[in-house]
Image (tube, rainbow, N blue to C red):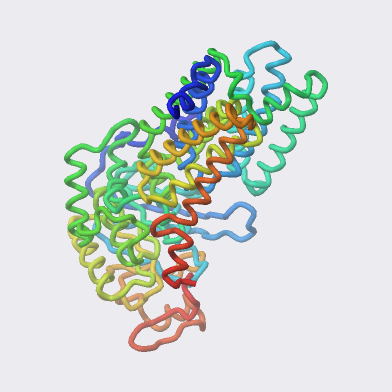
Amino acid sequence: MIMTWLIEPFTFAFMQRGLAAGLLVGIGCAVLGTFVVLRGMAFVGDALAHTVLPGVVIAFLLGVNLFIGALVAGVLTAIGIGWFSKEGHVEEDTAIGVMFSGLFALGIALLSRVQSYRDLTHILFGNILGVSSLDLWITAGVTVLVLLAVWAFFKELVATSFDPGHATVIGLSPGLVRYGLLILLALVVVSGIQTVGVVMVAALLVTPAATASLLTRRLPQMMGLSALLSALAALVGLYASYYANVASGAAIVLTLTGFFVLIFLFAPGHGLLRRRREGKA
Amino acid sequence: MAEIIETFNYGRVCTVPPVPGEPALEIKELTFTYPGVANPALSDISLTVMPGEKVALVGPNGAGKSTLIKLIAGLERPPSGKIIVYGNEAGDCHHRVAYVPQRGAVDWRFPVTVREVVMMGRYAHLGWLRWPTRADHEAVGRSLAEMNVADLADRQIGELSGGQQQRVMLARTLAQEADLLLLDEPLNNLDVPTQELIFGVLDEQAKQDRTLIVSTHDLGVLPLHFTRAIFLDGHVVVDGPVAEVLTARTLLRAYGVRLHYHEGIWDDNDVAD
């Protein structure tokens, strides 16, 4: 009985593709998200997601795959953010704030002239059940690339995060590593737009990693746990959309947020309730 | 373009071999101003340091001690003047220079173990896409033992006390097997046993012809642990053997009236950091 209930949704091809996309995007975002959380780059992730919008619209106008437009925009933004923070005329978060709202507005303006409201909501809030096979292949490619890059450059990512001065002295440029990280971020953010949309993709980066950081202080475990939470949330989100007719993107993000709140309250060692009990103010 | 290639340089072996008898460090007419600041942080610095010297950089807060160390480390590029480290321009020979920044420059909360931090010293010899070998692990093991932190090897760096963390940073420097050691305020807030342990190891390093440049507020450690003191105050106030330099007159020149003598040590009455 329960088995049929669990299996039935995934007899449909669009649900299978949705699940695959949710898992792939979730894992990519979760792994990279640990660096986003530990390096305090959550705002950057959010900004990247928003600046991608004009790229998507322009791709639509040119008739190319939306993914490619988003990718180009994302990578250009990553380079732009790196450049702004290097020049140092304005504070980095100010520069990002100005740029991301401006580009987002440009995207909306372009969109309002060419598309229906329905298409807009797909980009803003995601449409995991409308993932095409081509999208799925691109998403898979992005996730594999991100995992490979994190594995190959793990020691550089860690060394520049922990002590950028030492990294520079031994000839490893923290700026270069940061550029690389921003470009990888642009890639996962773009793939995340398929599943949860522009507005919520930052949640995929930040929430599972933040939750995992409450449970462990080991980086590899943090990444694994973060990916696991993300995968679980994708599954829960799809069931919610199938049986309760809830928007899948919102369901995924809400599930992730629920995990975070639960673990924040009950985590061993960090949990709020436990600290209460121990009489710590 | 050359600058872009330079960014990918990490792990590459120096092209210029060391020349025997060459100074460890040579600074010629160095002047440095931070962008957007009117007055230079350092002006007209010239000095030569030979291998095996133990140099203390002293001076009040804002005297340019950290800036000078960063310039020697290659973290800042001098707009005018020359800094030559073992015959190469500063920042060009990454294996030979080790740097321990002030505490605030390190993200102590980042989840890495003590062993991983010490291994970062070996990264200077590894470079892109190369993973630590057995020899690297052995070097890390020796450095951990030497700094007496082997029992903490698998702990998170953030769980350690300030003194233990400073010992780990020194262990990283030893693992790097560098010839020029640049330590920015390594003694701040450390208890005496930890200071003694650090000095013991540093003395050993100097005996192997390695060169130490250490900035410090604590003038009390000068006579025992350093061969040379350089008093900075935006420029070199006085530079010479510790015994000659450590006179009331030079101290007055370097610190003005802010200096007090109490409980056997000279101390700067500005609060450190």
Name the residue at 49% across, 21% down.
A8
Name the residue at 39% across, 88% down.
B262
Give the x, y percent position of residue B44.
Answer: 50, 58
A90 versus A234 height, above or below:
below
Displayed quadrant of residue A156: top left
Give the x, y percent position of residue B183.
Answer: 36, 60
Residue B232 at least partly seen? yes
Residue A196 at least partly seen? no
Q: Going by the image, does A222 lie left or right of A60? A: left
Name the residue at 64% across, 47% down.
A93
* Nearer to us in this view, B215 or A16: A16
Give the x, y percent position of residue B166.
Answer: 33, 62
Give the x, y percent position of residue B21.
Answer: 24, 49
* Nearer to us in this view, A68 or A191: A191
Outermost residue, front direction? A1
Name the residue at 46% across, 60% down.
B104
A20 versus B19 height, above or below:
above
Outermost residue, top direction? A63
